[in-house]
């Protein structure tokens, strides 16, 4: 299935296989860790990478916006990968995307990579966190005394076995006190860390999202 409904901190949310979380009560669409421009910076460092990853990621984001018609788009940190020259093609592509969705409020919860660039020049609002009970929206999944943390940053993953082959795939980690979204960007690596024992793990597979059985 492409979407899976879940209850997190008493709230109904929808987990989307396109690596997004939708909060129906607020009509907020949440994604994390786009790392726009990563391919460009790696090519400048000598890596032989194809062009088009930013376009594909922004097209996927546009599909989500079109499907959910959110009142607000929130990126949980690391919208960009690093400092870039002003004439980089991906910057023009993002400016075009933002112009097409100019009426959509777009909030970036600042991540560690965003601090290397003037992200406010991209036409987005930048905050350190968002308190929206029962949630606090952050970049890193650091604990909060009273609110359930929804974050990104660690690029969560899960292991699925196919016979002797193990597949490392992006995942949602839904814990009692914090939930972590998969990295949205196509070139993002996956954490070597495992989910915590009490986490519900929902894996993003090529065929959709799959909830793993709880560990005992």
Image (cartoon, helix red, strand yellow):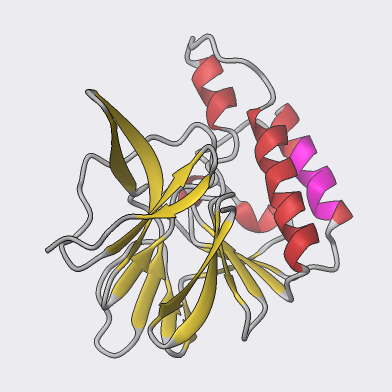
Q: Along the horizontal axis of the image, is 102 left or right of 130?
A: right
Residue shown at the point (59%, 24%) measured from the top left: 40
Location of residue 100 in the rendering, given as x and y in whole percent from the top left corner: 88, 53
Is residue 86 visible from the viewing direction of this image? no
Whether residue 23 is visible? yes
**Residue 162 place in picture, x, y as percent:** 31, 29
Q: Residue at x 20, y 49 (%)?
A: 194
Outermost residue, front side: 163
Q: Residue furthest left?
A: 216
Going by the image, does 72 lie left or right of 118? right
Find residue 134 and report its image quarter: bottom left
Location of residue 141 with respect to 144 vertically, above or below: above
Magenta segment, prevailing SS (helix, strand or loop) = helix
Compared with residue 154, is residue 14 higher up or lower down, i.e. above or below? below
Indicate left or right for 119 with 191 as reference.
Answer: right
Q: Quadrant of the C terminus?
A: bottom left
First to last magenta residue range: 92-99
């Amino acid at each position: 299935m492409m979407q899976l409904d879940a209850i997190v901190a008493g709230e109904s949310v929808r987990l989307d296989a396109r690596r997004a979380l939708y909060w129906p009560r607020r009509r907020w669409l949440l994604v994390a860790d786009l790392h726009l421009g990563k391919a460009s910076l790696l090519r400048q460092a000598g890596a032989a990478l194809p062009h088009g990853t930013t376009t594909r990621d922004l097209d996927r984001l546009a599909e989500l916006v079109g499907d959910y018609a959110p009142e607000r788009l929130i990126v949980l940190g690391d919208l960009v990968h690093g400092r870039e020259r002003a004439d980089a093609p991906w910057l023009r592509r993002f400016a075009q995307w933002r112009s097409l969705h100019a009426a959509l409020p777009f909030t970036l919860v600042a991540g560690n990579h965003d601090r290397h660039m003037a992200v406010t020049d991209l036409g987005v609002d930048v905050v350190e966190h968002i308190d929206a009970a029962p949630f606090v929206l952050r970049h890193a999944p650091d604990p909060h005394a009273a609110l359930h943390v929804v974050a990104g940053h660690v690029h969560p993953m899960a292991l699925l076995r196919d016979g002797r082959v193990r597949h490392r795939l992006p995942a949602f980690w839904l814990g009692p006190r914090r939930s972590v979204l998969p990295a949205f960007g196509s070139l993002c690596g996956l954490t070597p860390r495992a989910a915590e024992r009490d986490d519900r793990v929902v894996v993003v597979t090529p065929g959709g999202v799959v909830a793993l059985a709880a560990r005992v």
